[in-house]
Image (cartoon, helix red, strand yellow):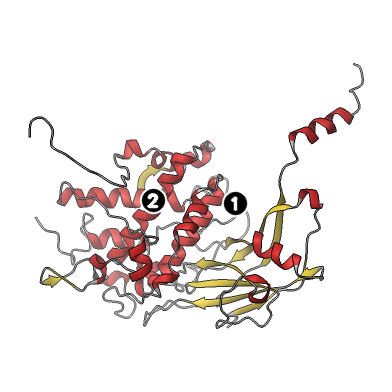
Amino acid sequence: MEISDNAVIDNRGYQYFAGLHGLPGQYCRHGNPPGSDPLFLPWHRAYLYFFELALRDQVANAALAWWDWTSPVSQASGIPVSYAEDQAGGAPNPLFKAKVQPAAQQNGQPQETFRQPGDPNELPTAEQIRQIVSLRSFSDFTAQLEDVHNSVHGWTGGTMGIIPWAAYDPLFWAHHTNIDRLWRVWQLRHPQNFQASFLNRALPPFPLTVGQTLNMKTLGYDYASTKVTVPGTRA
Amino acid sequence: MPERYISSPLELPSHDPAADFVRAELKFYGVDHSGLSYEARVFLNRPDASADTPREEGVDGGYAGSFHIFGHGGCFGDVGHCDVPSGPRHPYDLRLSHPLTPDTKTVVITEPLRRMRAHSAESSFTITVVAHVYDLGELPLGRDQTEPLLFDSVSLLTYESPPPLSATSEAEAERPAPAPA
């Protein structure tokens, strides 16, 4: 069964998930305002988790890919080819752009996503990320990583460059999966203890708390840099 | 539109040369993020800096770093939707903070500040912040668009490394013995 991208009220579909972040749902959490918990990383991990589950309901082995904007290829060419080409296999490339549901439009616009990318050498560098991952304090780390995240949204431009429509762009998911991966790398290097009030904080609209996003084993995924397989004895 | 900000003079911190700062940062408080997305480029002692000024570090270039705002693009709700509540919250109000609550942004300027201090006889300096607004194309942004670079204040914070353990022990040794009970 295929869910039409016009079926905006089907809560299994792309438009439903894209609409949770900015318009019309407006659930996303950004920033580190004083007196508030830093929910940027936990909220977006919950978002990715439920989006990937929805993908796997359609394709059992589907998995989110990450866009490492520090890679030599990205530093030279910018957006990965798989997202940058408007055609794939002789058909429109679904990773190039996506429709924007009417409930998220203003005066009928935007009807679909678009990008206005900057110069690839303006993307964050591996050295910047190395310094951020070396930070010991979670509040320092999340603030600096979120700032880099902001810069990539702005660098991509167009609908990706502004909160209301960013999540409609298929590139959004690859960008945020990379942010989530970097948080995982940091978690492995800097185990932390958090206050119960932070751990018990709910992450609406998702039925998860901050504490439940910290242990990736319970979420059932992880980030492997490489995977090499050879035949076993039954091959 | 304030796409450029020049601070009042900030006093250079004085540190004991034996315990100089190991980290220096500029903290921008009350940063608005309800409008456009932009990069805020920070220059030290460059009141002439503009959007065209190259981001060159060093004393002459003065570039110290930047922060980035991922904006909300204006208000898309009805009247009052984007007004951040002020005043104390009800103790049983478990809702998350208003999404447009002003943010705090930090730019680490340890090396640029050291360089500037080494080449300047002045006891104070200014910072210039230039907004570079990202290219969003022809998007239908919301009403009540705010201008870039709206914030309450900016502070320079410096941090010294903790004193070596031996010094701590000496200090404790000099402390008078507690009075007998």
Residue B175: which quarter of the image?
top right
Which residue does the image show at 71% across and 55% down from the upper left?
Answer: B158
Could one spot residue A20 in this view of the protein? Answer: no
Determine the secondary structure under disc 2: helix
Mark 2: which amino acid?
Asp
- Which is more toward the observer, A71 or B151? A71
Q: Residue at x 79, y 48 (%)?
A: B18
Labels 1 and 2: the sequence-earlier one? 1
Residue A56 placement (x, y as % from top left):
19, 48
Left or right of A158 on screen, residue B30: right
Identify the residue shown where x is 92% and y is 21%.
B179
Residue for badge 2: A180
* Occupied quadrant, residue A217: top left
Above or below, comparing residue A107 to residue A13 in the picture: below
> Which residue corresponds to mark 1?
A35
**Mark 1 and mark 2: span between their CA atoms?**
24 Å
x, y percentage for residue B65? 58, 67
Quarter holding the C terminus of chain A is top left
The quarter of the image holding the N terminus of chain A is bottom left
Relative image position of residue B121 (x, y in whole percent) = 82, 70
Chain ID of residue with mark 2: A
